[in-house]
Image (tube, grey):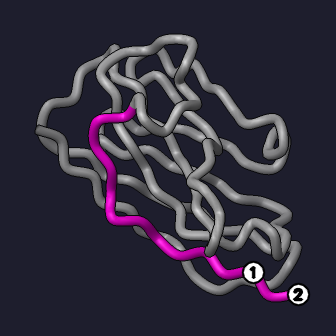
Amino acid sequence: QVQLVESGGGLVQAGGSLRLSCVASGRTFNMNVMGWFRQAPGKEREFVAAIIWGGGSTYYADSEKGRFTISRDNAKNTVYLQLNTLKPEDAAVYYCAWRPFFSENYYYVGSYAYWGQGTQVTVSS
């Protein structure tokens, strides 16, 4: 069992920044993968970024490369998503998620076993 709690969402103007946090508790190991996804109203949940817990390798959706950065603090069991140069189309509920090991389908929603409750990001134009 893994518990995930996100925080850090809020209202920001276009061009601004936010840092989302996800604290993990329970069964976490070095080979685990932590992912960030987002879901806007009326749209499907989509992959944003992922990180391998132990080695720190990172993976991004092409559309967010260069603006978003995923990182982790192993001592705090926390994964972060730094959102920079935010655009109105970035507005969504952001979720962190956990899967037990890495494979090439790391971007697939269905491959993650545990999810947080989500944190709302709103971007005003």
| Residue at screen point 38% across, 62% down | 6
Q: Residue 79: where, in percent of width, then height?
A: 44, 44
Q: Quadrant of the C terminus?
A: bottom right
Residue at 82%, 76% in the rendered image: 88
- Residues 10 and 63: in front is 63
Q: Which residue is mark 2?
A: 125
Residue 111 magenta: no
> For mark 1, does the 10 Å Cα neighbourhood hold few (<14), some (14 to 19), or many (20 or more) residues?
many
Q: Which residues are magenta?
A: 112-125
Quarter placement of the N terminus: top left
* Callout 2 secondary element: loop
Relative placement, left or right, of 119 versus 123 is left
Look at the picture and state if 83 lies above or below 28: below
Identity of the residue drawn at 82% across and 39% down: 65
* Front in this rendered view, residue 120 or 17: 120
User: Looking at the rendering, which quadrant does residue 16 occupy?
Assistant: bottom right
Q: Which residue is mark 1?
A: 123
Gap in Å between the C-alphas at discs 2 and 1? Answer: 7 Å
State yes or no: discs 2 and 1 in contact (Cβ < 8 Å).
yes
Judged left or right of residue 42, residue 67 is: right
Q: Amino acid at mark 2?
A: Ser
Position of 110 relative to 122 (above/below): above
